[in-house]
């Protein structure tokens, strides 16, 4: 039996249903058409993928993984959850401080605290280094986000004789 014969057998028996019957082959109840419907079902490709189940993650398990030095990305790979879910769970369980103690140089998502700013006076050669963009903005009386916008992508920004670069 080929696919054309199987389709024609089913359409002969159910002419008014047309191709709607092929959406759900379980509606074919005739015994002599079971072979044709099984053949068509075997020819179909799976259109939905089986998602692997994520492991449940509790507070103790998360704490142990953080103490072993896992990053958010590593925890997400090990548990099957997304990285944003891990970030929310760490925050929800109150383990954010522990995470940042174990990873002092990893900047949390959405925070600009880890980006150093180097400010150089072009005329005098004086150089100031700030540990965050926010502190540099406050020191030079810029509004929030001004320097981060001007120096994004490794660009250098000059204003009032000062050169601002990300460190």
Image: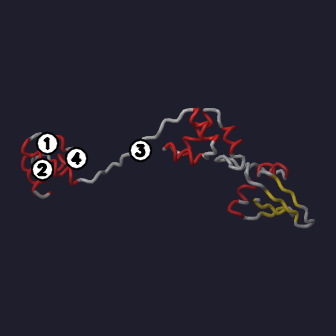
Q: Nearer the viewer, mark 1 or mark 2?
A: 2
Query: Is the C-beta separation of discs 1 and 2 under 8 Å?
Result: yes
Residue at 84% in and 53% down: 140
Q: Nearer the viewer, mark 3 or mark 2?
A: 3
Q: Nearer the viewer, mark 4 or mark 2?
A: 2
For residue 36, above or below residue 152: above
Per the rendering, the mark at residue 28 is 1
- Residue farthest right in this picture: 124
Separation of residues labelled 3 and 2 (CA atoms): 32 Å
> Mark 3 Cα within 10 Å, few/some/many (few <14, many 20+)?
few
Per the rendering, the mark at residue 50 is none
Residue 36 place in picture, x, y as percent: 12, 50
Q: Earlier in the sequence, mark 1 or mark 4?
A: 4
Instruction: Check the picture and name the quadrant holding the N terminus.
Output: bottom left
Separation of residues labelled 1 and 4 (CA atoms): 11 Å
Q: Dot 2 corresponds to which residue? A: 36
Regarding mark 3 in the picture, which secondary structure is present there?
loop
Separation of residues labelled 4 and 2 (CA atoms): 14 Å
Q: Dot 3 corresponds to which residue? A: 52
Regarding mark 4 in the picture, which secondary structure is present there?
loop
Separation of residues labelled 1 and 2 (CA atoms): 10 Å
- Residue farthest bottom in this picture: 123
> Mark 1 Cα within 10 Å, few/some/many (few <14, many 20+)?
some
User: Is 86 in front, or is 103?
Assistant: 103
Per the rendering, the mark at residue 23 is 4
């Amino acid at each position: 039996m080929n696919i054309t014969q199987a389709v024609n057998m089913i359409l002969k028996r159910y002419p008014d249903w047309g191709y709607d019957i092929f959406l759900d082959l379980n509606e074919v109840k005739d015994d002599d058409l079971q072979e044709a419907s099984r053949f068509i079902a075997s020819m179909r490709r799976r259109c939905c993928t089986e998602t692997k189940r994520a492991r449940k993650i509790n507070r103790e398990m998360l704490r142990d993984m953080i103490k072993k030095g896992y990053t958010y990305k590593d925890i997400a790979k090990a548990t099957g959850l997304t990285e944003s879910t891990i970030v929310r769970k760490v925050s929800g369980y109150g383990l954010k401080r522990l995470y940042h103690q174990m990873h002092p140089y990893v900047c949390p998502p959405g925070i600009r605290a880890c980006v150093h700013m180097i400010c150089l006076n072009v005329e005098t050669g004086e150089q100031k280094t700030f540990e965050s963009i926010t502190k540099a903005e406050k020191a030079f009386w810029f509004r929030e986000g001004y320097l981060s916008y001007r120096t994004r992508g490794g660009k250098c920004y000059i204003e009032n004789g000062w050169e601002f670069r990300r460190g």
